Image (cartoon, helix red, strand yellow):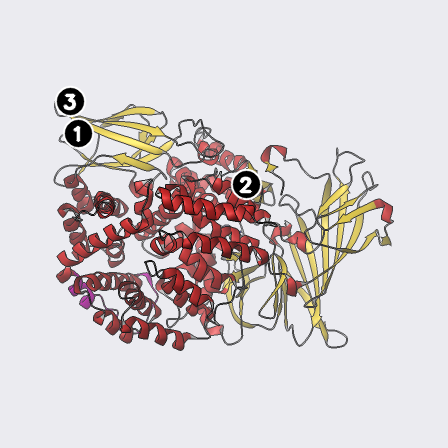
Amino acid sequence: GQVINLADYRPTDFVLERVDLTFELDPTATKVDARLIFHRRKGADPKAPLVLDGDELALSGLLFDQTEMKASQYTATPDSLTIRNLPKSKPFELTITTIINPEANTKLMGLYRTNGVYCTQCEAEGFRRITYFPDRPDVLAPYTITIIGDKAANPVMLSNGNFLGGAGYDEGRAFAAWFDPHPKPSYLFALVAGDLGVVEDTFVTMSEREVTLKIYVEHGKEARAAYAMDALKRSMKWDEERFGREYDLDIFMIVAVSDFNMGAMENKGLNVFNDKYVLADPETATDQDYANIEAIIAHEYFHNWTGNRITCRDWFQLCLKEGLTVYRDHEFSADMRSRPVKRIAEVRHLKSEQFPEDGGPLAHPVRPTTYREINNFYTTTVYEKGSEVTRMIATLLGKDLFKKGMDLYFDRHDGQAVTIEDFVKSFEDVSGRDLTQFSLWYHQAGTPLVTAAGAYDAAAKSFTLALEQMVPATPGQTDKKPMHIPLSIALFAEDGTPLEPSSVDGAEYGDNVLHLTERSQKATFKGIGSRPIVSINRSFSAPINLHFDQSPADLALLARHETDHFARWQALTDLALPTLLAAARDARDGKPVVASKDFVEALLAAAADETLEPAFRAQALALPSESDIARELGGNNDPDAIHAGRSAVLQQVADAGKSVFASLYDSMTTPGDFSPDARSAGRRALRNSALTYLSYAENVPDRAKAAFDAANNMTDLMQALTILAHRFPDSSEAAAALSTFHDRFAGNALVIDKWFSVQATIPGTKALERVLKLMDNPQFKRSNPNRVRALVGTFAFGNPTGFGRADGEGYRFLAREILDIDTRNPQLAARILTSMRSWRSLEPARAEHARKALTAIAKAPALSTDVRDIVERTLK
Ligand code: DPP
Ligand code: ZN
């Protein structure tokens, strides 16, 4: 594929006025008639041809104003249709006919079949696999859709917008017509047809309009859509209350399908979901599944305003809709659940996924300026860092001005395709604040490193914080400018009481936020009567790495007295990390591992502190992961040593806290009927965390086996199964539990995915053999992305010792699998390949194995653009 540059953006020569599509459905030969009305844009070159995008298309008919076009006037190839000699200014109509094969579409982009259901995925560039079209997000038009299909096979025929009508048709066929009055880009088009069950409800909007809500699922799964429906109604209400945004059609539909490349898709009025993020009941879904469903239902619904009504001018602006919409779904979940616990989970995710991306060969700005394959930019940088950038705008402006800025953005740009600059301008206009320097967050890749050092002057009653910032070099960006970094700060006295400065010199400071804007800056806090203990970057006000040498005693004080619970968790993590890093080094050098006493005591104190909510205590007990430790170590990483060191620390915490864990295990029960609410989920999380530590302290599988047998919900069942499989992989208890689990849930693909994943992540050198064997299991279907992610993806992303085994077999396995997956589904292959992004941080022998495996992929003939782009950037 060729390189696309932001600097080359220009509007189309032709304006698209209307789209009228007719689909005659057939599993292998669906006929698509696209009637498009265009006119030449004012001021455009009067001789410019119309160039439409295609992808693996064949043209079977072309009419100009209802008459057949002469072959000399156009050129059709599989990936473009060029039409010459078009009118200078008057509107004209083209009718383009293509015949496509949904059954053969294994890329799952465009129109495809999943379990006998027709389904589309058009973002980013799937629409061009349906018909020739100006397939770019700044071409907006109203769509009318007619679907004609076999009546018995397709009782359900859906598209965007409002239902116009439908009826039986000749010879066992039926038709349905839909009209979407809201001009939209082609990536938001959707069509679904087939035989599906439905759950129905209604929502009354803030202006008292009744909206019909429908969730379509496979027959027999209707009851499992109840939680998704509830989450949808809560999302609609929350968006009205918090952002003043009302839904705008008579009907909102969600369809759950089992073959899907992403989590879900926000098509106008017709969201299509991976069924993993719709279906839930206590027997089959974990608390995490419930939380994910709530978040993703909300995310896609929120896109209706941030993405659909206001969309992206071009794909470089992807964060305009994604970063903003992730911010909105984060805020929604924080309001539905516990705000600090949600923030901790977000930051954990950001650090474990986005920080490695930002620190490796695939690093790119939140708003990139160049790409070869846009599918590869649906990244955690665009989404999660993009959300953090939006959060920082809210921090800089404060709640009221942020709300005003959002309102201005909605008013000013409704119905438009806009840029990040337009978005930022709304906030500048309402606040009078110059956000030029702040905007570097969109343009400079890499996680800034902030180094802090404090000095207290008792005589002057002042505390000076010396801050320095450094943004590391990233691919294509070597010289970085200093950023505008909002640091939320609090000072505490030795007894834990907060200290308020009378004033702060040397930096802008307000609402407890210090603005770091220079490379190096000194802020002096006046009127501080005793040596302060400082808490920096509270609530993770900026997505940075912070180096701040604090004594274990100071960290322990923050862990106990910070009023921001996120900061308490951060202090515990800062206490844990030195112990875990030392443990990894000691394990590598064959020295005994010793966990620091300060750390163990602080951790157990938090675990036992009944004033803290259970969900928070569970987060505190979940130590930084092996990949977190690898990231902190930075280089020359040996996954076996990291694993051994971390396990030894876990063992020492477990031994020291055995009685605490035993009492938590007994007390944190959730009597009565299962409820997925946050409070009950928090109790389960803490109890299951205690169970994990007890499995170390007791070192026998008995308690986990009893928990497995007693579990009445999927959260408890999975935790017990994970402990048995990961801690006692060779025990008869583990084997029995795995087989019981398999037999009980055989036929429920989403649960069998958990069974695959739990085994794919069993640490140690035998993991690969296990994965290979599981790939022969009849339940493993290579054509299904969820199965492939559950087994191959989870192994590569989530099993550092098994995947990264010293002989390099894991990397060679991945290379073979990537090449195989790439022949069917390039997007999926490219995504899983990003698991190799941190290969340069491995110790030299493993790094060399990894490099060779990557090189083998790069050398393979006929790679997709998707995989070629990732492998070449990863090796660079
Ligand atoms: N469906 C994906 C999302 O909502 C891409 N737009 O993030
Ligand atoms: Zn999104």
Mark drawn on residue 460: 3
For the residue with label 3, is its CB less than 8 Å from the closest atom of ligand 2?
Answer: no
Q: Position of residue 466 (x, y in %)?
A: 26, 26
Q: CA distance from mark 1 to mark 2?
A: 45 Å
Q: Is residue 674 magenta?
A: yes
Residue beneath the point at 72% across and 43% down: 15
Q: CA distance from mark 2 to mark 3?
A: 50 Å
Q: Amino acid at mark 2?
A: Gln
Q: Position of residue 586 (x, y in %)?
A: 21, 45
Q: Position of residue 437 (x, y in %)?
A: 44, 28
Which residues make up the magenta segment? 661-678
Element at label 1: loop
Q: Nearer the viewer, residue 155 or 29?
A: 29
> Up-down: is 218 above or below 489?
below
> Up-down: is 200 above or below 436?
below
Residue labelled with disc 1? 528
Q: Dot 2: few (<14), some (14–19), or many (≥20) neighbours within 10 Å?
A: many
Q: Amino acid at mark 3?
A: Ala
Q: Is residue 149 magenta?
A: no
Residue labelled with disc 2? 317
Pointer 1 with pointer 2, Cβ within 8 A = no
